[in-house]
């Protein structure tokens, strides 16, 4: 029980800090020889208790590592999901993180996976591979973007195996391009120390300062028009501004630095397309732009940037509105920080499509909305 309590405490520590985790992102685990306890999918790390973790059989998870699955990605992920459900010891009503097999693979008692803005400023940059090699050398493993789920697990299985052959141990730090970082150790204090060392190394020769993001309520003709337009459809809006938002609102050119998702979590909570409206548009033109957007993408915009104005979030309820604002703020932070490493590197259309269509991420979005 003591080990599980430490897992809860380290989960709450990182989960309550938006510099590391936002909404239902990230996951943590503890394992012994026979079992692994891992955060349930969609449940926030902030405030998580023992009931938020799923206990699974490591022996049954090992069967997934060697089993052959369909080449069709949709069918494959469904087959893996079924086998993972079969490995659950308790509770049966929760779904374990899709990255459970990856946690099981990392040969440390504790694993903490987060999406820190500072780390992802590097992970979502054009020069990420060169910079990681320069900053971390053999102390970390870097893996190019790979679709989450079984394919990512198999890639990590291969790359960790190669790392072990060269260095004789499992990497304690694993960086994933356009995703985040996994940190493993046999004690939670070492986990904290490793995260501090990551932060120090990245900040050593980098300007990690960000524009102030103290959100203020924002009103304009466009924001009021959008509120009325979406309210008639049962959707809520919230218009805000801050120094960070002001930076990306200046022009369409700067908006292009945030107009596509950097990570899967951004797609889960904000979708994969965002709307920019020029300051010269009148009320009818603003509404037309929203209709054209929805016709083109199949859903109303979750995020609208008004030129030289503010950010308008659109969602079903207040909880979801706040999540959109938190996650898209992270999107802007990542873009701003990426300029230290050659500028932003977005997910590709194929990578975005995989996440958009993946049942696992639809499930996470549903849980997040309550």
Image (tube, rainbow, N blue to C red):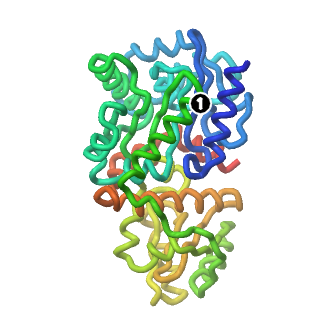
Depth check, front residue: 107 or 139: 139
State the image quarter where residue 157 is shown: top left
Which residue corresponds to mark 1? 189
| Total numbered circles | 1
Question: Is residue 66 shown above or below 226?
Answer: above
Hey, which quadrant is residue 147 in on the image? top left
Q: Is residue 288 above or below residue 81?
A: below
Residue 273 in percent (x, y) is at 44, 62
Give the residue drawn at x 50%, y 21%: 108
Q: Vertically, is 55 above or below 369? A: above
What's the residue at 52%, 19% (across, down)? 83
Dot 1: element: helix
Q: Residues within 10 Å of mark 1 (few under 14, many from 20)?
A: few
Which residue is found at the position 57% from the left and 47% from the top?
A: 21
* Quadrant in the picture for the N terminus: top right
Q: Does residue 308 lie above or below 167 as drawn?
A: below
Q: Locate residue 11, reporting x and y percent.
A: 64, 36
Q: Is residue 302 left or right of residue 142?
A: right
The answer to whether residue 86 shows anywhere in this view is no
Q: Is residue 177 visible?
A: yes
Q: Position of residue 203 (x, y in %)?
A: 42, 52
Q: Considering depth in this image, is 67 or 3 the residue closer to the camera? A: 3
The residue closer to the viewer here, 338 or 192, is 192
Q: Residue 201: where, in percent of width, then height?
A: 40, 45
């Amino acid at each position: 029980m003591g080990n599980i309590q430490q897992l809860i405490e380290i989960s709450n520590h990182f989960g309550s800090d938006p510099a590391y985790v936002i909404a239902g992102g990230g996951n943590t685990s503890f394992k012994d020889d026979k079992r692994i306890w891992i955060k349930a999918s969609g449940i926030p790390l902030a405030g998580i208790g023992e009931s938020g973790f799923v206990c699974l059989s490591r022996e049954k998870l090992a069967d997934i590592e060697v089993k052959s699955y369909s080449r069709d990605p949709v069918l494959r992920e469904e087959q893996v999901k079924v086998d993972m459900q079969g490995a659950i010891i308790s509770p049966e009503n929760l779904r374990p993180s899709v990255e459970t097999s990856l946690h099981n693979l990392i040969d440390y008692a504790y694993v903490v996976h987060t999406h820190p803005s500072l780390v992802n400023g590097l992970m979502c940059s054009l020069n990420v591979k060169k910079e990681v090699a320069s900053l971390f050398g053999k102390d970390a493993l870097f893996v190019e973007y790979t679709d989450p789920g079984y394919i990512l697990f198999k890639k990590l299985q291969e790359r960790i195996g190669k790392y072990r052959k060269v260095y004789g141990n499992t990497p304690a730090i694993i960086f994933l391009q356009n995703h985040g970082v996994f940190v493993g150790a046999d004690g939670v204090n070492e986990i904290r120390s490793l995260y501090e060392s990551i932060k120090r190394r990245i900040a050593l020769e980098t300007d990690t300062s960000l524009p102030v993001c103290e959100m203020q309520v924002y009103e304009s003709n466009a924001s009021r028009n959008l509120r009325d337009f979406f309210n008639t459809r049962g959707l809520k809006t919230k218009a805000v501004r801050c120094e960070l938002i002001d930076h990306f609102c200046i022009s369409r050119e700067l908006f292009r630095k945030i107009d596509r998702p950097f990570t899967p979590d951004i797609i889960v909570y904000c979708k994969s397309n965002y709307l920019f409206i020029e300051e010269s548009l009148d009320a009818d033109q603003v509404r037309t732009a929203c209709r054209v957007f929805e016709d083109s993408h199949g859903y109303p915009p979750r995020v609208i940037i008004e030129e030289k104005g503010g950010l308008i979030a659109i969602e079903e309820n207040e909880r979801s509105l706040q999540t959109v604002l938190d996650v898209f703020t992270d999107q802007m932070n990542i873009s701003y920080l990426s300029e230290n490493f050659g500028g932003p590197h977005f997910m590709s259309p194929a990578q975005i499509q995989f996440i958009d269509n993946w049942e696992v991420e639809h499930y996470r979005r549903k849980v997040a909305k309550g």
